[in-house]
Image (cartoon, helix red, strand yellow):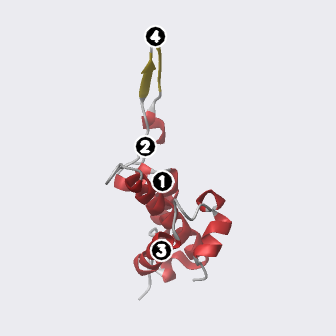
Amino acid sequence: MSVDAAKFRQDFPEFADTTKYPDAMVNFWLGFAVLMLNADRWGAALDYGVELMVAHEVTLAAASKAGKPGAILAPQSSKTVDKVSVSYDTSAVKLENAGHWAGTSYGMQFFQMARMMGAGGVQL
């Protein structure tokens, strides 16, 4: 695996703010992702899988840091301001059994890829 905090920030420039997303946070999740993902299954996609997992986790961590401890970022289905309201069909982007991975767009991408990486047989 060749991902470090600098490479992660290069590939995902939306995380360039080291105050909001400190290196310690990014490095923690990089180390965790490496432990969790099977390099043999992920193959050449391992670095991207690691980066998606880190992006998901640091997004949630930043939300917690911003005063929403343990926050899961769920799609907002409706909002009303004065006499104007808007609603969305959130089922259109729902992933069955995605759990907390559905809390961010990065998590949903990761979950979809993880499903693919787990498909097929493995010869021991």
- Residue matched to label 1: 108
Q: Secondary structure at mark 2?
A: loop
Q: Which mark is residue 57?
A: none
Calculate the distance from the C-alpha at mark 1 to the C-alpha at mark 3.
24 Å
Query: Which comes before the other along the chain, label 4 or label 3?
Result: 3
The image shows residue 122 at horizontal and vertical percentages of 44, 80
- Residue matched to label 3: 24
Which residue occupies the foreground of this view, 46 or 33? 33
**Which quadrant holds the C terminus?**
bottom left
Calculate the distance from the C-alpha at mark 4 to the C-alpha at mark 1.
33 Å
Q: Nearer the viewer, mark 1 or mark 3?
A: 3
Q: Tell me, yes or no, whether the two marked residues, 1 and 2, touch with CB atoms within 8 Å.
A: no
Q: Which mark is residue 94?
A: 2
Q: Nearer the viewer, mark 4 or mark 2?
A: 4
Does residue 119 appear to the left or right of 67 in the view shown?
right
Q: Look at label 3 and name its amino acid.
A: Ala
The image shows residue 69 at horizontal and vertical percentages of 32, 53
Badge 4 density bin: few <14, some 14–19, many ≥20, Cα 10 Å: few
Q: Number of callouts in the render?
A: 4
**Which quadrant holds the N terminus?**
bottom right
Residue found 46% across the figure and 68% down from its top: 119
Calculate the distance from the C-alpha at mark 4 to the C-alpha at mark 2.
29 Å
The image shows residue 117 at horizontal and vertical percentages of 49, 69
Calculate the distance from the C-alpha at mark 2 to the C-alpha at mark 3.
31 Å
Q: Secondary structure at mark 3?
A: helix
